[in-house]
Amino acid sequence: MFVQVLEGRVNDVEGLRAQLDRWRAELAPGAAGFLGATAGTTADGNFISLVRFESEEAARANSDRPEQGEWWAATSGLYDGDVTFTNCPEVDTFGAGGSDDAGFVQVMKGRADRSALQAVAAETEALLQRSRPDVLGGTVAWPGDGTFIQTVYFTSEAEARANEGREPATDEEREAWERIGSAMQVDTFIDISDPWLVSA
């Protein structure tokens, strides 16, 4: 899997939503290798979009389509200032991966050693899934510079907030969360309370 992350400040939220709906209806059917997209605007007016493709080659082929270029030319004016693109050629998934059933999405950025995090995640995933039924799944995308972009899909924001404040029920659960926490340094949290979700 390959993930491309787009971020920028929006000056016309409704216009951007209309353009995203247009992309889904008109361009997505011709985007070979497109797996899905997660997008949304934060409370302070910033927009983030995480687009999943089968491979980097598929993502590049989509970017090279004339209709994609025309769409972006019409869409870029809905942003204020620069728009950043982050390409992530390595992606890990957990649970259901990117889920269109999510009512709330949280994106976390930070630093971690991928192999160390993978080892801890493999050992603790089953337990953490049982302890957090509000977590549908997620992805961890790696740009290749030691940083990660993790996207977690929740049933709802209310359930996510309630469970994140809950004390672990057992010592085993507490240890699992501590191990995950020690394997990754999270620097930024981005909350998408009204996620725009689409799959191929």
Image (cartoon, helix red, strand yellow):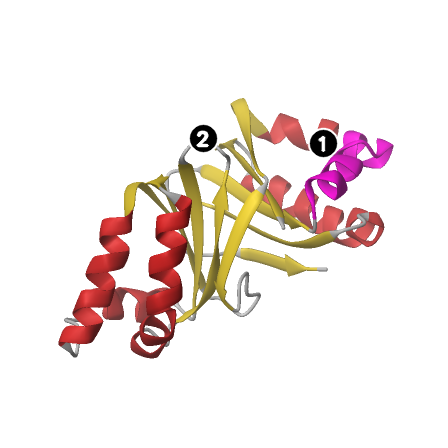
Magenta stretch prevailing secondary structure: helix
Q: Is residue 87 visible?
A: yes
Q: Which residue is rendered at x = 49% and y = 39% of the image?
A: 47
Q: Which residue is rendered at x = 19% and y = 59% of the image?
A: 178
What residue does disc 1 label?
A: 72
Extent of the magenta region: 55-71
For the residues bearing labels 2 and 1, Cβ distance under 8 angstroms: no
What residue does disc 2 label?
A: 145
Measuring from the top left, give residue 114's x and y in whole percent: 41, 46
The nearer-to-camera label among 2 and 1 is: 2
Where on the picture, by quarter, is residue 180? bottom left
Where on the picture, by quarter, is residue 35? bottom right
Please say whether residue 63 is one of the residues in the magenta stretch.
Answer: yes
Say whether disc 2 or disc 1 marks the residue closer to the N-terminus: 1
Residue 197 position (above or below residue 126):
above
Please say whether residue 57 is one of the residues in the magenta stretch.
Answer: yes
Measured Cα–Cα span from mark 2 to mark 1: 27 Å
Which mark, by number, is residue 29? none
